[in-house]
Amino acid sequence: MINKSFPRELRLLTPEHFKTVFADPVRSASPHITILAKTNNLGHARLGLAVPKKAIKLAVGRNRVKRIFRESFRLRQHEFPNIDIVVIAKSGISNLDNAEINALLEKLWRKLCRRCNG
C-alpha cells in the first residue's frame, strides 16, 4: 500500500531550499497559479508554498488555498519525479471555488511532469 502522508521530509523548509528552485526552474503556469520545479537528488518530490498577502488579503483565504495545494500534492506525490516544487498563488485565485482550483492544479501537475520527464 502506498503511503500518502505528508511528513516534514516532503516540505521545502528553508530559504535556501526555495532559492535553489527560483534559480533556474521548470515552469508551469496559469493566470491564477504558477508552479516552479527543479530536480533534486533526494529520491522524492518536495513541496513549498508561496501565498502572498498581496494575492489573498484575508488569512482564512490564504489558509484555504494552502490546504488545497498541500492536499493535491499529498495525493499525487508518488507520480512526481525527484523534484522540488514551489506553488505560487496569484491574485484572483480566491474567486475560484475548491473544485476549480483542484482541476487547475491537476492540469498544471500533468504539464509539469511532462516538462520534467521529457
Image: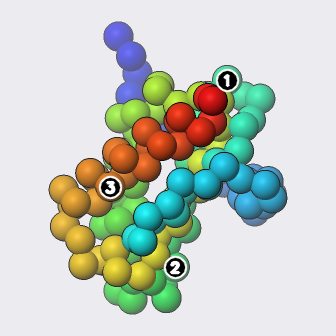
x and y, in percent, of residue 13 in the image:
66, 54
Residue 14 visible in the displayed image: no
Drawn side of residue 113 relative to residue 13, left or right: left
The mark nearer the N terminus, 1 or 2, is 1
Label 3 crowding class (10 Å Cα cut-off): few <14, some 14-19, many 20+?
some
Q: For the residue marked with disc 3, what is the amino acid?
A: Leu
Q: For the residue marked with disc 2, what is the amino acid?
A: Pro
x and y, in percent, of residue 24 in the image:
78, 55
Image quadrant in which you'd find residue 98: bottom left
Q: Determine the residue positioned at 34% across, 45% down.
A: 106
Work out which quarter of the rendered image holds the C terminus and state it. Answer: top right
Label 3: which secondary element: helix
Residue on which disc 3 sits: 104
Drawn side of residue 62 relative to residue 99, left or right: right
Vertical position of residue 109 compared to residue 102: above or below: above
Considering every residue shown, the one lying at the far top of the view is 1
Vertical position of residue 11 compared to residue 32: above or below: above
Label 1 crowding class (10 Å Cα cut-off): few <14, some 14-19, many 20+?
few
The color scheme shown is rainbow
Q: Determine the residue positioned at 37% across, 51% down.
A: 105
The mark nearer the N terminus, 2 or 3, is 2
Label 2: which secondary element: loop
Residue on which disc 1 sits: 43
Q: CA distance from mark 3 to mark 1?
A: 26 Å
Instruction: Work out whether residue 34 or residue 40 is closer to the camera in this orientation and state it.
Output: 34
Residue on which disc 2 sits: 52
Q: CA distance from mark 2 to mark 3?
A: 19 Å
Instruction: Work out whether residue 118 or residue 76 is closer to the camera in this orientation and state it.
Output: 118
